Image: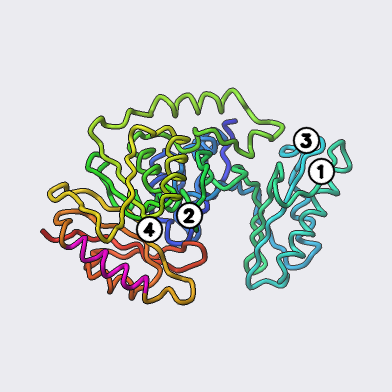
Amino acid sequence: MKERRMFFATCAPGVERVLHKEVLALGLSNVEQQVGGVKFEADMRGAFRANLWLRTAVRVLHVLRKFQARDTDELYNGVAVVDWSKFMSRNSSLSVHAQCRDSVIRHSQFLSQRVKDAVVDQLRKGEVRPTVDKRDPDFRIHLHLYRDRATLSADTSGESLYKRGWRRYMGRAPLPESLAAFAVILSEWDRRSPLVDPFCGSGTILIEAALLARNLAPGLLGRSFAFEKWPDHDASAFSEEKDKAWTKAVPLPRKLKLVGWDKNRVHLHGASENIDSAGFTDQIQLEQGDATLVEFKKGWNAWIVTNPPFGERMGETETIHDLYRRFGKNVRDRCGGYRLALLCANPTLLEALAVEPETLTEVTHGGLSCAFSQSTIPN
């Protein structure tokens, strides 16, 4: 359990800086921000904490080894060195996710097949008879090949960490929980002032804000993790880490205002289901309303954290620009002293908003290059 191991917490491009601060806050060792995530060293208890606490990570990979793979034999032999019986028991299912770039071996599908062959050949010499399950495997293997240098990892998380366990309603193009948490954290919300989302959709930003204000680890909400199925999993130690995490949770401030609006009644009903599932029925207020007409309370000095429609469908361009113009006017007229933080996929939409951004952070959302804009609305 106390053996030091290397891990890599992955995230969406652009989120690395926030994730780096999260990993540092967990007290883990040799933390290093890299492209696409954050490397750190820890024992398995540290991996437990990372999976329980990291709000902006997508998954936590246990880096097993790095080796040269200039041809298929080197790849096969490099994979075969690992004792895979530590991760899979009788009749476990597995999947392999492979990426390659600037290498002799150029096809990710072929890489995946060769890795699978090495693992299965080794395990079938014993009593383990693994099967391949690409949809819902017990164990996931990751291989990253760059300039013929392979990094082989075991996925400790299983399902993506943004799948907290509270979501009952998806809605149209919902914001992943990890990006919602990123937006709330990067907005520098003080966890005491009102936080409002005038395009609340399925309620993701409001729920992630409530979890942050409670200091509640997002991994405590009923989901499971891949490492729990490993043969040498220390269930007692993991239970202790969960108990410790629960002790750090605090009640929401009694006067804290978390408010969401949406024009669509179906979205509001779905958001209500999600809020109930997350345990914030009485703490988050939902109202039907048009973001361009909502009467924000003057002098509230609230944070507006939101993910407005992107308008990526054909024929929506002018409609979305008009939405941003009218929303911007409403904010400028009624929200002096407020902080505004929003995700936007098109720079011209920010121009239509007519609220000067103080900072812009590039981030990828759903394959789109977006900007996270932060502003203070003048009084």
Residue 125 at least partly seen: yes
Along the polypeptide, which appears first: circle 1 or circle 3?
3
The structure's colour scheme is rainbow
Residue 342 position, x and y percent, is 33, 59
Q: Main secondary structure of the magenta part?
A: helix
Q: Secondary structure at mark 4?
A: loop
Disc 1: which residue: 130
Q: Distance of mark 3 from mark 4, alpha carbons? A: 43 Å
Q: Distance of mark 1 from mark 4, alpha carbons? A: 42 Å
Other-residue count near label 1 (Cα within 10 Å), few / some / many at <14 / 14–19 / ≥20: many
Q: Amino acid at mark 4?
A: Asn
18 sits left or right of 145 in the view: left
Along the polypeptide, which appears first: circle 1 or circle 4?
1
Q: Amino acid at mark 3?
A: Ser
Residue positioned most to the front: 265
Please say if 249 is above or below 170: above
Residue 327 position, x and y percent, is 27, 64
Disc 2: which residue: 174
Residue 368 position, x and y percent, is 48, 68
Region rendered in magenta: 319-332
Q: Are marks 2 and 1 in contact (CB under 8 Å)?
A: no
